[in-house]
Amino acid sequence: MATKIKRTLLYIALTLLAICCMIPFALMIINATRTGSEIANSFSLVPGKALADNWATLSSYFDLFKGMRNSLIVAIPATLLTAYFSAMTAYAMTVYKFKGNKLLFGVIVVFMMIPGQLSLIGFYDLVTNLRLVNSYLPLILPSIAVPGTVFFLRQYCETVLPMPLLEAARMDGASELHIFHKIVLPILSPGIATMSIGAFIGNWNSYLIPLILLNSPDKFTLPVMIASLNSSTDIMRNQGAIYLAVAISVIPILIAFAFCSKYIIGSITAGGVKE
């Protein structure tokens, strides 16, 4: 009886927590249907009637779907590069005990503590010298080396990677790349999927670097386009349009999270070893 009461209380607490998490999304969708004056003057959980007007205002400033396409052009390759090369680096640092391994790991930890904004001027000078301004390449290629992802995947490797399985594969004549692709990646897939969620969200929401490097409005990513509404002179009238743009921009993030969450659950036992 006591166990049943505890379980019931736990379900009630989790339900309330889920509702609290959904409230910001509900307000965002509701405000997307209201005018700027209504948003500024009152709080309401009832949808308004200005959805069509907000869409018209939004469309008058930029092409939302072109912004989504541009953001996907950046976010998808950057996420794939982050996941693959970070997993390869983490695997190498875990399995191969070469000289300077701990020093390299310390350098990675130090770089995790350095804000990216500190290197922004030098990065812009480098991009300018390489004549890559107004190109997506400077937004994608740096994703090959992400210290935070390498750090967490290295810790994950040390926890789940079975060394006897790797030794058995080597004895059977498997190459190192074959071992990595056929054995290590399936085992690391839950950790890779988890880090890929954060990588995709970070690249999708990236604002500062695309703002600095992209000069052509046709190449602007979605966050840069949405920011143009905030910088407009009629910002009060555009509040509803801003909420509408943000609500639509969240959709790919929710899809990516749902896909990766399902993948994590389905791959928990992938490549597992029974002792």
Image (cartoon, helix red, strand yellow):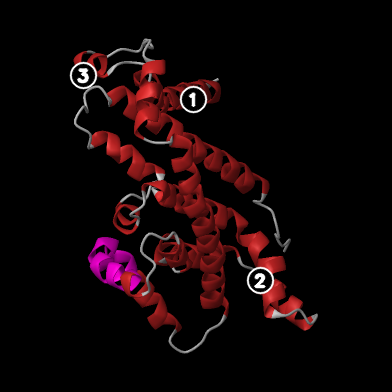
Q: Please name the amino acid that badge 1 sits on.
A: Lys
Describe residue 80's horizontal placement relative to residue 25 as left or right: right
Callout in the foreground (1, 2)? 2
Dividing the picture into quadrants, the one containing residue 121 is bottom left
Name the dominant secondary structure of the magenta segment.
Answer: helix
Give the residue drawn at x 41%, y 64%: 138
From the image, tell me which residue sits under label 3: 40
> Picture coordinates of residue 79 (x, y %)?
51, 56
From the image, tell me which residue sits under label 1: 6
Q: Please name the amino acid that badge 3 sits on.
A: Ala
Give the residue drawn at x 51%, y 77%: 93
In the image, is residue 261 part of the stretch drawn in magenta?
Answer: no
SS at badge 3: helix
Residue 1 seen in the figure = yes
The disc, 3 or 1, on the residue closer to the chain's N-terminal end is 1
> Above or below — where is 182 with respect to 251?
below
Give the magenta range: 111-127
Badge 3: residue crowd in 10 Å (few <14, some 14–19, many ≥20): few
> Above or below — where is 214 with respect to 87?
above
SS at badge 2: helix
The disc, 2 or 3, on the residue closer to the chain's N-terminal end is 3
Residue 110 seen in the figure = no
> Picture coordinates of residue 274 (x, y %)?
73, 61
Q: Please name the amino acid that badge 2 sits on.
A: Phe
From the image, tell me which residue sits under label 2: 180
